[in-house]
């Protein structure tokens, strides 16, 4: 097992690294990647706001996600500034097949605890995969400036996925969280095997 695989599995928890071809395709479509990245950051911020509104009675969740909203919106502004610097427009939001498939995997029945758990684990998985993709860009792009650009995002995002798991374990039994997290990781591995490798998407 190589060092990269160990890093993906042990640090981010993911069962499958991204296809190595992805970063090469992304390098050829940097405008599209920046646009998709901007919308990913925007959606991360608005999803945290939505969780705060939905679970406003959960004090720790509100406390911990409030600064994440600020951070993610700051990231959106940074990517937007990079687009403008290159005289590029934001463009239209694209359908995120990866995230839509994760949402489909959420349990639709069950009680509020199950729904909270899947909301938090969905976010944990998106953050983990985003961080892994930023790592790919920070190491695989030929442009030194853009490698550094994405290294900063990777470092900033690295701890986000664990926060969502920590919140889940605060509100639900750890055993239950870990069992469902294992199911999510197995599902995401199959999804990454099945989904088309595209260079114009972060996911």
Image (tube, helix red, strand yellow):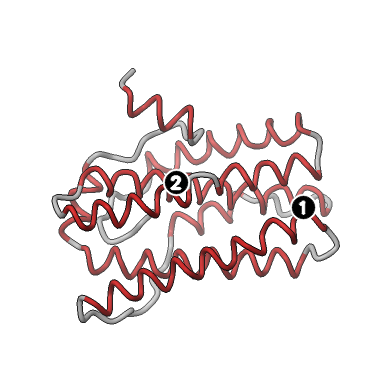
Residue at (33, 40) in percent of width and height: 18
Image coords of residue 43 (percent x, y): 52, 67
134 left or right of 65 in image: left
Residue 141, labelled with which disc?
none
Q: Is residue 39 above or below residue 25?
A: below
Residue at (56, 49) in percent of width and height: 160
Indicate the secondary structure of the residue bearing disc 2.
Answer: helix
Q: Quadrant of the N terminus?
A: top left
Label 1: how many residues lie within 10 Å, few (<14), some (14-19) or many (20+)?
few
Q: Nearer the viewer, mark 2 or mark 1?
A: 2
Image coords of residue 203 (percent x, y): 39, 53
Image coords of residue 92 (percent x, y): 36, 79
Please report contact status of discs 2 and 1: CB closer than 8 Å, yes or no. Answer: no
How many numbered tags mark residues here?
2
Real-space Cα distance between discs 2 and 1? 26 Å
Indicate the secondary structure of the residue bearing disc 1.
Answer: loop
Label 2: how many residues lie within 10 Å, few (<14), some (14-19) or many (20+)?
many
Image coords of residue 150 (percent x, y): 32, 54
100 left or right of 33 in image: right
105 left or right of 127 in image: right
Residue at (45, 37) in percent of width and height: 190
Q: Earlier in the sequence, mark 2 or mark 1?
A: 1
99 left or right of 174 in image: left
Q: Which residue is mark 1?
A: 109
Residue at (69, 31) in percent of width and height: 179
Most extreme residue toward the top is 1
Residue 129, labelled with which disc?
2
């Amino acid at each position: 097992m190589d060092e990269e695989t160990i890093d993906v599995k042990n640090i981010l928890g993911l069962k499958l690294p991204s296809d190595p071809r992805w970063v090469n395709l992304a390098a050829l479509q940097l405008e599209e990647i920046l646009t998709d990245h901007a919308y990913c950051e925007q959606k991360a911020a608005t999803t945290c706001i939505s969780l705060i509104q939905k679970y406003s009675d959960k004090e720790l969740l509100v406390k911990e996600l409030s600064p994440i909203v600020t951070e993610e919106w700051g990231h959106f502004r940074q990517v937007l500034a990079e687009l403008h610097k290159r005289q590029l427009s934001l463009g239209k939001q694209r359908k995120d097949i990866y995230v839509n498939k994760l949402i489909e995997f959420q349990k639709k029945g069950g009680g509020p605890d199950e729904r909270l758990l899947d909301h938090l684990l969905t976010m944990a998985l998106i953050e983990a995969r985003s961080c892994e993709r930023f790592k790919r860009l920070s190491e695989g792009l030929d442009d030194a400036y853009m490698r550094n650009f994405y290294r900063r995002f990777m470092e900033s995002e690295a701890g986000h996925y664990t926060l969502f798991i920590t919140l889940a374990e605060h509100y639900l039994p750890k055993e239950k969280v870990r069992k469902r997290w294992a199911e999510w990781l197995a599902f995401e591995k199959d999804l990454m095997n099945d989904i088309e490798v595209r260079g114009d998407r972060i996911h």
